[in-house]
Image: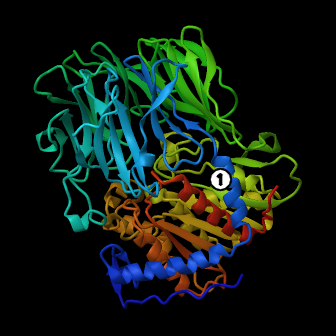
Amino acid sequence: MSTPAYPHTRRLDLTEELFGQPVADPYRWLEGDTRQHAEVASWSAAQNACAQAYLDGLPGREVFVERLSALFDHDRVTAPYKRGGQYFYTRSAGLEAQARLHVRGSVQGEDRVLIDPNQWSADGSTAMADWSVSPQGAHVAYAVQERGSDWRTLRVVEVDTGRVLEDTLHWARYTQLSWSGDGRGFFYSRYPQPADEAAFEAQLSGHAIYYHELGTTQAQDRLVHATPEQPHLLHVFDITPDGRYLAVYSTPGTNSMTLSVVDLATPDWPLRQLDASYENEWGVVGNVGTRLVLVTTRGAQRRKIVSVELADAQVAFVDVVGEQEGVLNEVALAGGRLLVAYLADARTHIQRFTLDGVAEGEVTLPGIGSAGGFRGDPQGTEFFYVFTSYDAPTTIYRYDVAEGTSQAWAQPQVAADLDRVVVEQHFYTSRDGTRVPMFLMRPKHLRGPAPTLLYGYGGFGISLIPAWSPAQYAWVEQGGVLAVANIRGGGEYGKDWHAAGSLGRKQNVFDDFIAAGQYLKAQGITSSNGLAIQGESNGGLLVGAVVNQNPGLFDAALVGVGVLDMLRYNTFTVGQLWVGEFGDPAKEADFHTLRAYSPYHNIACGQPYPAILVTTADGDDRVVPAHTFKYVAALQAADIGDKPHLARVYGNTGHGAGKSMASVIDELAEQWAFAAYWTGLDVAVR
């Protein structure tokens, strides 16, 4: 297919001198919101039409639509919460646009639909995000998400009748929902109301925690915690299962935070600070009376479990379960036991401990994969968890704490022959000698090199663990190889692994990913002209950076909702929260680091680039479309060969969460068909 004629892009004569370096920014005008700036909207529409015309002509697109539709057409269930003797969980039935909230009266009883977001919008673009059940099971507070935005509107439904209450709360963002122990109200986090015209693109500050009592207006909500002297902090929280203690975490956006506690049994709710350092991670497990049990990285880069006696005047953290060889990933307090998930080489195992930290063996898992999504009652005997792997569709298991046995509670039937694929774990060496793990899924019968899709993220301490993905399976069943690299910047080996890929050491992330591609080709896993790479958000930054640094290694690149202008990222919406991960462009040392790898600023003219499809969404108010617009304009203006470099702008969606199933399938089919065409993957009905 010939390269399409790109729409014209106006170029500014704009160069700034920053720390002694001239920095050109000819496409800054594309930073405008398409809802407010007609010229940007017109340019975006023209680019999108160009990309869609090209993608519609790709062979294999309709095959991927058909297979993705079949592979997603199964029930997807979350682990249940038990409240007031009833079980609450979400279920996505087949190809429904959005998941519904269900409730049932017993663990194997009949269920009924309590909330159905599929009734909220004609195109399925309105979703239910966070939700929380009151301790007595009488009410559910839930968040409404429209068109993929990070803004949330909070509502409440009465469980027995299904009646939605008048309570309506606006401007919630980056929030949990946690009920008070008496069920009379719940806690949430929000920002002040922005100016109407600035709600999408303005920088945000003033995050705060509030308490809302049922039957009152939002103006009457009680302020629990805010830091007007530090307006860019995020304030999030946990509540103990008995509803007595509210743990408050204040963070500049990194994985480290302060820890404070509110004793809700006191009338004035004073905030008691337990750790003011901004150096550690914290998370509440539960409490035994006034003894609070927490997970932390304090003195343990792979995390450990500690307790603190809140009745004591002096704060003293005591180890309950010390740091282990694996990375502590999740903890539940159920049946009077601590159930702890550890990652070892990115694979999960679950250990049991008493509340005093005495080891009691392991929970037997169905296989090698990932377990999490823990749900349990501290006083009950049952505990639910999710198990999944690349070749194991996500299944909910019910574990009997007293008996030590697991049974499948919700197991999907998928339209996939899982015996046709094999999953392997490889280890390769990065540029500086670091050993990096990588998972592969490939057809069992495959002999010799094949087109490969290499996926990565590498940031914010987020671990890429084995998980069932209909999208990734759809690639492999066509004869391709899936590779997932557990590069630095993630959390697979703890806090140090994350730190080794952030701030001034971000180049390690790119080196690890480039080394993964080189390993795949050197080992004969990938065909010589058959390597596609994919990443989204921070992973979109990853893909954009490595293409600039080694364009000849890759044959196709999928850059999704990427952070691509690293010198201005912190000026958009919540970008300031990422300074602890990337660095501050206003500081000279950070500026030079960011300038050296920023995808928008480092396109290597004179070298042939792979085919690149850059995707964004008109409703993305987290990584705003401006990143994609400026980067694609620079690609199309550069002398980098004749392969296509396209911008696909999806409508009525945002950064990712809340997309309708139809949107998910259409987007994946386009991206997979693009990667297949440029890697030589033979796509056909099989």
Q: Which residue is mark 1?
A: 69
Residue 306 as seen in the image, left or right of residue 8: left
Horizontal and vertical percent for residue 346? Answer: 61, 39
In front of the other: 305 or 382? 382
So how many labels did they put on this image? Answer: 1
Quadrant housing residue 249: top left
Three-letter amino acid code at the position of disc 1: Ser
Q: Is residue 623 visible?
A: yes
Is residue 511 in view from this perspective? Answer: no
Vertical comparison of 262 with 345: above or below: above
Classify the position of the C terminus by image quarter: bottom right
Q: From what the image shows, is residue 522 above or below residue 274?
A: below
Which residue is located at x 34 percent, y 23 percent?
137
Task: Kindly identify the residue that appears in the image at 31 percent across and 64 percent down.
Answer: 200
SS category of the residue bearing label 1: helix
Residue 8 coordinates in the image, percent (x, y): 48, 90
Question: Image quadrant of residue 320?
Answer: top left
